[in-house]
Amino acid sequence: GRAVVVMYRDGCIGGMNVILGDSSEFSEVERGETLSNLSGFRSFLRRDFRSVFSEREYGDIYPSAASVPVMCGLPGIRGTGDPVGPVLSVVGCCGRAFARWMGRRLGSLGQSKHVAGDSF
């Protein structure tokens, strides 16, 4: 769905700090862990999926760099309790292009009358 949330700046920043302060959900990422994830994902693509892609697709989805998701802000309504949730930018993350490719391939599955939509 589409919703617009109007908030004071202090409320938005305070909400982000509450979310980021939840150590059961978030932890600081070590630089070595990010590079290790990139290396593992590259190996996964070469080993398990290389024959699935055309040359162009493989070139488009093969990651050349990695970064961790960056929190951009708090978006629309999510449900009761904490009504807003974080927006994460995944630009530069090693699995972003692969996830987009998978979304294009699997998107039609979500159009079935037997699939429930988002519950929040």
Image: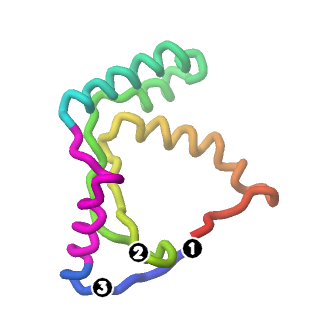
Q: Nearer the viewer, residue 5 or 85?
A: 85
Q: Which residue is mark 2?
A: 82
Disc 3 and disc 1 in contact, CB within 8 angstroms: no
Q: Quadrant of the N terminus?
A: bottom right
- State which region is magenta: 12-29
Q: Is residue 35 magenta?
A: no
Answer yes or no: do the residues labelled 3 and 2 have beta carbons within 8 Å? no
Spatial separation of the CA atoms under disc 3 and disc 2 = 14 Å
- Cα–Cα gap, marks 2 and 1: 18 Å
Q: Quadrant of the C terminus?
A: bottom right
The vertical placement of 120 against 30, above or below, is below
Question: For residue 24: magenta?
Answer: yes
Residue, x 41% and y 75% (percent of image)? 82
Please tell me how crowded label 2 is: few (under 14), some (14-19), or many (20+) other residues with Cα within 10 Å. few
Q: Quadrant of residue 7?
A: bottom left
Q: Is residue 45 above or below residue 29?
A: above
N-terminal label among 3 and 2? 3
Query: Any mark on residue 1, and which?
Result: 1
Residue 89 in the image: x percent, y percent? 33, 54
Q: Nearer the viewer, residue 117 or 30?
A: 30
Q: Which residue is mark 3?
A: 7
Q: Position of residue 78 (x, y in %)?
A: 48, 72
Image x and y of residue 52, in percent? 60, 21
Q: Amino acid at mark 2?
A: Asp
Q: Earlier in the sequence, mark 2 or mark 1?
A: 1
